Image (cartoon, helix red, strand yellow):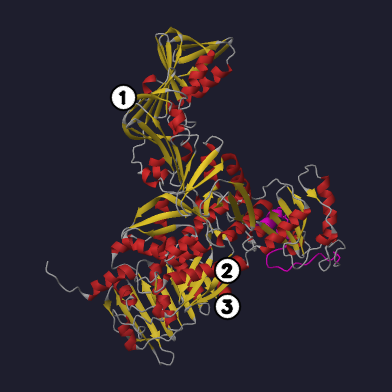
Amino acid sequence: MKITIERAALQRALTAAGRVIESRNTLPILANVLLRSETGTLSIHATDLDIEAVAKVACEGEDGSACVDAKLLTGIVAKAGGSEITLELVNGSVIIKSGRSKFKLGTLPIEDFPQLSDATFDAEFDMDIAAAFAPVRFAISNEEARYYLKGVFFHAKDGKFAAVATDGHRLAESTGEIDAEFAGVIVPRKLCEMLPAGNVSIAVSSTRIRLTTAALVLTSKLIDGTYPDYIRVIPTSNDKIVTVDKAAMTAAADRVSTIATERGAAVKLSIAPGQIAFSKAADGNTADDEIAAEYTGEPVDIGFNSKYLHEMFAVLPSGPIDIHVNDGMSPALVTSPAVEGWRGVLMPVRVS
Amino acid sequence: MAVQQLPDTLINQIAAGEVVERPASVVKELVENAIDAGAKRVEIATAGGGKSLIRVSDDGSGMSPEDLALAVRRHCTSKLGGGLNDIRTLGFRGEALPSIGSVAKLKIVSREPGAESGYEVRVDGGAGGEPRPAPANPGTMVEVRDLFFATPARLKFMKGERAESGAITEVIRRMAIAFPHVRFVLSGPDRMTTEFSTAARPIDRISQVLGREFADNAIEIEAVREDVQLSGHVGVPTYNRANSLNQYAFVNGRPVQDKQIMSALRAAYSDRIPRGRFPVAVLMIELDPALVDVNVHPAKADVRFRDPGLVRGLIIGAIRQALEREGDRASTSGTTGMLSALRPQGAAPAYRPANVSYRPPANWSQEASPYRPQNTEVPFGFAEPVQPGFIDAEIPSARAEDIPPQTAAPQASHPLGAARAQVHENYIVSQTQDGLVIVDQHAAHERLVFEKLKGAMSGGRLPSQMLLLPEIVDLPEEDCDRLAEKAADFEQLGLGIERFGPGAIAVRETPALLGEVDVPSLVRDLADEIAEWGDAAGLRDRLESVASTMACHGSVRSGRLLKPEEMNALLRQMEATPGSGQCNHGRPTYITLSLADIERLFARR
């Protein structure tokens, strides 16, 4: 192998593929990228055994392949002085030259590099998956024991898709139109955090999902589990609807939780016609605040974890937000008139 | 082979398998007999780790020839008059002597105090057993030779001589703590002679057995709940050991090694002792014999309480109360170690030869030095000259402060004294009425924050996060029953559970403090805990451990410079806070160095 590549393009490709690589690895090969040049294209493979990334970049020169340390290669390419980089495999080492600098990196056998097994896909379609997942990602669970909640539940039926995340304390669902149909799959958190922006080609099966853009192909295993019947917990008959301004609401919740001493600080909301009063008591201190709100129903008291409130409101655009409540003991539904197809559910905190 | 009644010797040998496990168990049985006979003096001699000889002599009530003949027969005892519900003696099974007789060469010589002559009876591997007259002192002497000669298989499983003789010492130590009014002498060619002379108070005997250091670092406990009485001595948390060998428990005077008692002891110290370290404690539990079953195992080391939850609660409550009362006491062993570290190498022994009264050379003036700190007055003379030295030090890590006179004088009401300086940005040096105290500011402040958080947690119901999807945990029906019974307690801590059919529990809310939590494993742990102990402290412990982590992050770090006012405020808060003698990880938060110790360092005493 002896090839010449444009430095900036190589850096972009290495960064894109390298995001799959874990910072600490027990298997040395997983800290490597597999470089494979074939008829004018260099493909850069990286994997953590669950997700495989293949980035492509144009190159000139002889075909060949080699496995080198991803972190070192990325660092060298980022700092290199020249606008072009040559990679050459000589006696089991990769020689990297750019401008007047020269590096020699050791390699690992290419046949040791793990390959995800091939899979057949049930559905193929194009969509902006990053935009669809972005407003629900915050609700993904971190709890090892409920591994099936550690991702976004994604399914499509009758021309509509839904992406859902929940940790059992809150839930978010984003829906939209789609030209495909497939049974629900659970997309792992790590993939959700590295989705390419914009429209991508997607292929799904019951065990794999593949996202393809011009420069990058991401193939990931799916979480093998049964997602709970989430529709059941989305309240449909909460008739007390209060409309608040996003900025005013988050600022007030933030202000009163200043005095909180503990994690998961609960804030009490007293909803009354025309206003919401916020209150918080901790460690002998109290905080009270008030914001204007559109509301005409019966007064309701309800407590929320201020962090959950903040994270949910953060995914919505500024402006009015509707909170649908029933009573202080049952789930509240959050919607935004500006975001069609999005719903959030917050479970209250019981505060004395 | 047809079914047949086994011969007596074989029956005894089978019983011996459980009763007489090793030489130490023989010693235990024989010493128990001596004490049950009302002995005031028990002498034990062993040879070959007890395998070749065990001899136990006492000055107890002795036995008549008729009794002697019966004593070596199985299920003959003088001790079980009131039935198994009213056991007031150490022994009661009537198995020990015949069992020993079946596996060893047993000789008993006994004389009742009023009797004209003594009698002896011999049993060799089960054979013999007719008493005949023999010369004897009042009391009983039991001699066991060639233990297990009749059961060679067991002999093979014996450990080395040293290990067996160590086990015998341990038995005597336990007995000695249980019976302070009895004199014990343990001797033999395989050991140094150990003597525990009659002690007037239990603590005197405890310090004979566990060493003076334990007595110095022990807190007396005394508590009664319903009909159960607990007394004893427990070590301060900073006086801890790497194993649990120094934990002694006695139920109605009987030494026991009971899992439940030991676990209660561990729980009582849970947030005060680091993991892997063990408190030192002597616990005496007295209760109506009908409320406890000692007939669990022939070795009688296990007991079953009628109400284990009560006993556990009593132990934990009494120890915690005692530790809180004396909570700011730190171990003196640190100071002792420090003193020896401070002494000039090799010089100290010359000043104070052991046990020889020290006489100064004749030409040495006997007057007190004019620079000697004045104990009776405010010792300004100590503070002032030292401070300029700190300032001049090349490494500016110690700061001296002009301390306003009103805070400078150590007062009797302030046991931690007045702050004098902060050294190495972490240690507060404070002067007390009779010495000085060095405080680790981070450890001390961490404890203060922790105690405050704990206090906040115990007031009122804790906030709970309701769950969108109630967690259904499948459990055996008994566990569900037990959990459901405690539902109200859990609710107070923010865990909302309810019965979900016969074999499952639905969790609807979890403590908000725990954030996202693995609900099934939490509930299973709690169920296990209730099953074993009758209460579930685990949830509170979990919450407290969250509080403890937050306390660590929320406290004054090492390296923070503190102003004199801050240092004094920290000392005053420590005095007011129970348990401030050690940090959440169990390390001491301060050590004291008494003026006497300082004077000793300078050979003024």
Residue type beneath disc 2: Gln
State the predominant SS element of the stretch in magenta: loop
Give percent across and percent down for residue B76: 31, 82
Tag nearer the camera, 3 or 2: 2
In this figure, which residue is indicated by the disc labeled 3? B201
Q: Nearer the viewer, mark 2 or mark 1?
A: 1
Q: Residue furthest left?
A: B2
Taking B475 as reference, is B114 left or right? right
Q: Magenta segment: does it hold B342?
A: yes
Judged from this view, the residue extending furthest toward the right is B370
| Residue identified by numbered label 1 | A118
Magenta region, residue range: B337-365
The front one of B362 and A78 is A78
* Left or right of B518, for residue B352: right
Amino acid type, callout 1: Asp
Specify whether B93 is left or right of A10: left
Secondary structure of the residue carrying tag 2 is helix
Q: Crowdedness of circle 3 by 10 Å Cα count: few (<14), some, many (20+)?
A: few
Judging by the rendered image, the residue that carries numbered circle 2 is: B321
Q: CA distance from mark 3 to mark 2?
A: 23 Å
Tag 1's secondary structure? loop
Q: Nearer the viewer, mark 1 or mark 3?
A: 1
- Residue appearing at x 42%, y 51% in the figure: B519
Quarter assignment of residue B371: bottom right
Q: Earlier in the sequence, mark 3 or mark 2?
A: 3
